[in-house]
Image: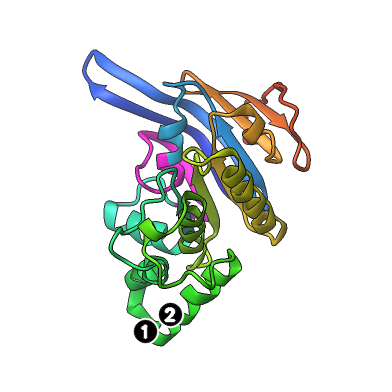
Amino acid sequence: MSIIQTFELTKTYGMGEIRVRALDGVSLSIDQGEFVAVMGPSGSGKSTLMNILGCLDHPTEGRYILDSVDVSQMNRAELAGVRNARIGFIFQSYNLLPRTSALKNVMAPLLYERNNRRGKEEREAAATQALEAVGLGDRMQHLPQELSGGQQQRVAIARALVNDPAFVLADEPTGNLDSQSGEEILNLLHQLHGQGRTIVMVSHDPEIAAQAQRTIYLRDGRLESITRNGSRARAYARAEVKHEPV
């Protein structure tokens, strides 16, 4: 079953004669429980694609089906609701509230739930469970500056998971980390994938991207190649792309 499907996604910036196609007819499909990486040089369109997949923007043309719902032309309020309920974000720079404990950082997305269906105790219990799942049960009251980079990223992962999203969107999740911390975060992502999580990861590093099951490579706004890496594969090679969702 596909969680993500895009059909001829196009994103154009500018007006009149000065127009840039950041995305040019991108069609792809990502199944439930897949671990997929997205790569491409500067200007390839990967950031634009991630903004659309993350419901931070919508395409100029084409369709985006997320978990069986067409979100292509939703307004900002509707997209915000989808983001909070269906997508877990992991950022390179962690994006934690600096004067807020790890527990309250993880609780933050629950404050924006529609209908506010969970009380404070339930929100705290859900955040506690998410932090314990990433190995930070003993760091819940620590502020971000009291945590290492790897620990801060674990808090960010717990925050991404607390709403039980349809998929996790990880933007350069190891980019600010040393080699050992980066490997620990990758191992955690593999654990989450092994538990059935759908993960879409942006990376500029071929070795990191090759650990995903597939690597989608963009160039000049187009889908250039898809590599099937296998389980935690490290080899990087391009594959021919079909001109339809794959």
Q: Looking at the figure, which quarter contains the C terminus?
A: top right
* Residue under numbered circle 2: 124
For the image, the number of numbered tags is 2
Identify the element where label 2 is drawn: helix
- Amino acid type for the residue under numbered disc 2: Glu
Answer with the quarter of the image where residue 183 lies: top right
Asked whether disc 1 touches disc 2, contact meaning CB atoms under 8 Å apart, the reply is: yes
Q: Position of residue 181 (x, y in %)?
A: 57, 46
The residue lying toward the viewer, choosing from 93 and 142, is 142
Q: Is residue 58 visible?
A: yes
- Amino acid type for the residue under numbered disc 1: Lys
Q: Looking at the figure, which quarter contains the N terminus?
A: bottom right
Residue situated furthest top in the rendering: 17
Residue at 52% across / 69% down in the picture? 131
Q: Position of residue 98 (x, y in %)?
A: 30, 58
Q: Is residue 210 above or below residue 118?
A: above
Identify the element where label 1 is drawn: helix
Residue at 39% across / 33% down in the picture? 61
Residues rendered magenta in the picture: 51-70
Residue at 47% across / 31% down in the picture? 46
Q: Position of residue 99 (x, y in %)?
A: 28, 63
Answer with the quarter of the image where residue 193 lies: bottom right
The answer to whether residue 234 is left or right of residue 126 is: right
The residue lying toward the viewer, choosing from 40 and 101, is 101
On whether residue 21 falls in the magenta region, the answer is no
How is the model colour-coded?
Answer: rainbow
* Residue under numbered circle 1: 120
Q: Is residue 216 above or below residue 99?
A: above
How far is the residue under mark 1 from the one under mark 2?
Answer: 6 Å
Q: Is residue 32 visible?
A: no
